[in-house]
Image: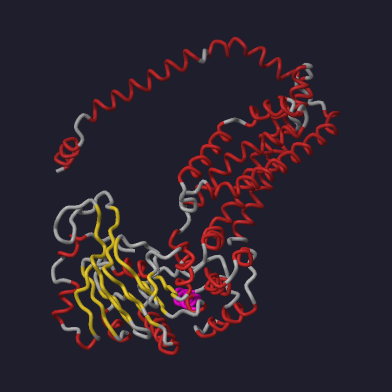
Amino acid sequence: MIRIEGLSHYYPIRAGSAPIGVNGHRSNREMALCDINLGISQGERVVLLGSSGAGKSTLLRCTNLSIKPTRGKVFIGGREITSAPIKEVEQIRRQIGVIYQQFNLLEGASAMKNVLLGRLGYTGTMQSILGRFSEEDHAIAIDCLTRVGLEKYAQKRVSDLSGGQKQRVAVARALAQRPKTILADEPVASLDPKLMKEVMDLIHKICVDDQITLVASLHFLELAKTYATRLVGLRAGQIVFDDIPAELTDKDIIDIYGETEDWVLYGKRGF
Amino acid sequence: MAKEVSKFSSALRPGRKLRHIVILVGVALIYIWAIEGSKTNPYTLVKGFPYIVNYIQRMFPPDLSILGKLTFKVGETLQMAIMGTTFGAALALPLSFLAARNVMPYRPVYQATRTLFDACRGINEIVWALLFVSMVGLGPFPGVLALTMHLLGALGKYFSEAIEAVNQELVVAIAATGANRIQTVFHGVVPQVKPLFIGYIFYYLEHNFRAATVLGLVGAGGIGIELITSIRLFKNQEVLTTLLVMVLTVTAIDRLSAFIRMRFIAGVEA
């Protein structure tokens, strides 16, 4: 279970970007998220919608504290993590697998090695430095590679794999964490339409089978409607829509994406 | 149309011509100052020309009888380079992480390590050698120490810059698995910089061999000691032999190292 309370985040302003806050007043910091309140139950599949810069990535990154939010609280499984000591944050992070648009794998290492890195949170510092993962971790890694259909590629270098295969390795790495939640930041935006569907099907199946909560940002509305149990629309750092996909009307879509280019004013800062 | 464009561009940058003149005068002044101070005088060179020809003539034919002795000294130079590179790299490797902003959040430590690197690198090997000869006596070992100190500075700088240039997203991804700080550095940063580090170390092995050839001039071992002895005793034929051996071995080491570096960087990569 994830609960987010009063979450706001500002990035330090960069030269050249418009110094206009959400409320129109000038400030020297760029507002990415403004007072977000969100509760997500176990097993939900939430898709975040919004234009570039609406705050989707920032929200995902604040959820596992990859970014420390300026204000507000994040609760994971009832535990408030924004002020928790780093050891606890690390233990919480183990339960949250993350998938990125750019895969973020070690290109020079094998698929197996990359999936094993998903076990780092369960491995002692010394063992992991020496590259000694337990028998159990190896078994888990093989199992995860099998579930994404890449067991034959375990010893292949990631740089020799295709884009779709790379994202499957990333899914396997997240899965190796035995996660309760998967955060996916534009997981298929780097893939062609056919692969998009394949990889989304895979993520969807895994989340349904293992009762994993999914919070994903997706660019394509059609994909979002297909895989989500709930849609959350963000605009300029605020939630403007939060309901089941069937309730999303054309008016809501305009609310989220805007019909004019006025959202450009809020800056395109996005990860 | 074209005229309008040029008018427009000069309107954008007023005083551009004046700036050019100021720069030109400035450069001219710097050269006048440098020529004056360094007593650069083509006439001295022309006047000395007969002596230069004479000196070169007396170098021929090279005295090959000292080849055996030189071979031994080439070996010693290589041994110094290997040890200096090993110690320098071994020290720079852990310290460079302290001098990388993305790994070391505490500014004082970062600044102190950076300063140490700058100091070590700022002092030339031969100056380090002079100091170490005074401290621990003549021979190749003070040479090794000299190479170590300079290399610590140079590798420390390049290592830490490589660490700062890693793909930070990948590091964030490793931290997101629940890895602790040390694990994140070892599995997120180290694999990214490893091929670069290996490349730098081999480059500096080659650099250190070149540097070690002159350390003998101040009594810190290696082939340089033969050169300075021959020059002082006016044994010009030996000077030529020594120079030839230096050129040949440096070239050979450069080629070998380039070959190994290429194989390594192509083959290892994380």
Residue stretch in magenta? A162-173
- Image coordinates for residue A134, horizontal then vertical, percent: 64, 75
Which residue is painted at 63% across and 43% down in the image?
A: B204
Tell me the quarter of the picture where residue B29 sits.
Answer: top left
Up/down of A266 relative to A244, above or below: above
- Colour logic: secondary structure
Confirm whether the magenta stretch covers residue A166: yes
Mark count = 0
Q: Position of residue A92 (x, y in %)?
A: 45, 72
> Is B252 located above or below residue A236 in the figure?
above
Front residue of B174/B151: it is: B174
Where's the N terminus of chain A, which quadrant? bottom left
- Please provide percent x and percent y for residue B262: 62, 54
Nearer to me, A9 or B203: A9
- Describe residue A119's horizontal placement relative to residue B244 as left or right: left
Who's the residue at 51% across and 40% down the image? B114
Whether residue B224 is visible, yes or no, is no
Q: Residue at x 15, y 75 (%)?
A: A254
Q: Nearer the viewer, residue A158 or B117?
A: B117
Foreground pick, A200 / A7? A7
